[in-house]
Image (spheres, coloured by chain):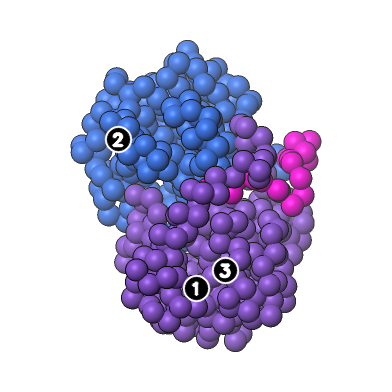
Chain colours: A blue, B purple
């Protein structure tokens, strides 16, 4: 039985979690003898997300010590904070010894990086945070998703859906992945078309990033130094 | 202040909720004097979703009697069950008197329809359930999203993201909607391309639909009759 463990922590970006969860959880319905999906957390009580939605994990970290795959969602300040959450990092390091897939969505890759799991690997993250991966020995790549060894990292938020469909095909074949794509009617039609990256709101995101890094490292001076956050 | 109320109930499809929530909640950050996002439910304790994720609403129905907009997520059997949940329907009917937008994702439109809120309106839903809208006086339309009067309905699951971007532009302008699209990096790249509808797994979904209708109306004979569910 291959257990896919989605990692939860307070303040995560809900869609980073729910996009890939919605794509990969049907594997456990379509192939119940092969796949199992769980949400792991420090506890199974309510935690916040980046929206008014509160969520709860199905299992504690201790209950799922050896998942086949972990998927780490990202976020803003809470994710930077998670980069120095020793219980979360210890879980990822332990899981990383046996897991065959270490996946992330958005800035979730920074948490994998903080657990020293991306050293030497190509990886990606949200466009506004991409260069930070280098500070942890990973090689930043601006792609929708990047697969390198065990590391399977997706770009920002919605990229987790595309990446998870790719992963589903890798794990269970393209027919199964297409069946899931029909089920969730993933036939995207963004009303203003694809993004024109020349128009990206870079100044706004530089400010959001600076705030996230400063606030997320307020209690973690070593991480602040590593990330190059100026003392305030 | 315009309150956008996402409606929760046990067993809903998580992505139906979290897709549009992730698109529309940033309105309350970008325009805090104009928009507020809440999740309403019969209570604010944990409820299940279609995945191992459990969620909690932020407010009870009674606490948000007059939202500006409601968004009703869909699902399979639990959503059919919600079509005869009198407390949920009463909330939607009451909200429907003053709300300016009655939105849904996937089979959430069947719940709006069961509350008699789509009579005479064009509407859509998940592709495998589309014809059922007619039984409640709505006019089924096979589009990614359909806007008709107050009714704003999206097709299956992932269509809620596209529809919510359109709604965000309607409420706050296209620039704001594009800013949100960059934030969540919604630049879709489905690994196998768009869906080829000739290959849709129709037999599988006919069976899933039959199960959902039969199980979801087990305690609701009137609804079973209306939906044409054969007595077992």
Location of residue B164 in the rendering, given as x and y in whole percent from the top left corner: 64, 58
Question: Which one is nearer the viewer's eye here, B124 or A189?
Answer: B124
Q: Which residue in the protein does label 2 denote? A: A33
Q: Chain of mark 1?
A: B
Q: Taking the image as drawn, is residue A226 in sight?
A: no
Which mark lies nearer to you, 1 or 2?
1
Q: Give the structural element (helix, strand or loop) at label 1.
A: loop
Figure quadrant of residue A117: top left
Q: Which residue in the protein does label 1 denote? A: B227
Question: Residue at image x 38%, y 50%?
Answer: B51
Figure quadrant of residue A83: top left
Q: Name the mark on residue A196.
A: none
Q: Which residues are magenta?
A: A183-200
Q: Give the structural element (helix, strand or loop) at label 3.
A: helix
Question: Which one is nearer the viewer's eye here, A215 or B101?
Answer: B101
Location of residue A208 in the rendering, given as x and y in whole percent from the top left corner: 59, 44
Q: Is residue B132 magenta?
A: no
Q: CA distance from mark 1 to mark 2?
A: 34 Å
Q: CA distance from mark 3 to mark 1?
A: 7 Å
- Tag 3 and tag 1, C-beta contact below 8 Å: yes
């Amino acid at each position: 039985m291959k257990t896919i463990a989605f990692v939860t922590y307070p303040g995560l970006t809900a869609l980073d979690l729910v996009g890939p969860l919605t794509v990969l959880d049907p594997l456990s319905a379509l192939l119940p003898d092969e796949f199992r999906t769980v949400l792991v957390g420090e506890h199974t009580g309510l935690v916040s997300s980046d929206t008014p939605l509160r969520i709860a994990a199905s299992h504690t970290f201790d209950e799922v010590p050896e998942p086949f795959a972990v998927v780490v969602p990202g976020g803003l300040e809470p994710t930077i904070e998670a980069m120095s959450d020793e219980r979360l990092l210890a879980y990822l390091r332990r899981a990383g010894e046996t897991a065959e897939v270490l996946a992330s969505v958005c800035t979730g890759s920074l948490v994998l990086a903080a657990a020293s799991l991306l050293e030497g690997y190509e990886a990606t993250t949200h466009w506004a945070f991409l260069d930070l991966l280098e500070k942890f020995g990973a090689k930043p790549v601006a792609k929708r998703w990047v697969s390198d060894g065990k590391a399977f990292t997706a770009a920002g938020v919605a990229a987790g859906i595309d990446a998870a469909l790719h992963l589903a095909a890798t794990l269970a074949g393209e027919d199964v992945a297409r069946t899931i794509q029909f089920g969730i009617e993933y036939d995207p039609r963004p009303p203003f078309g694809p993004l024109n990256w020349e128009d990206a709101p870079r100044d706004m995101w530089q400010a959001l990033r600076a705030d996230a890094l400063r606030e997320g490292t307020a209690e973690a001076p070593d991480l602040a130094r590593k990330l190059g956050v100026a003392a305030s």
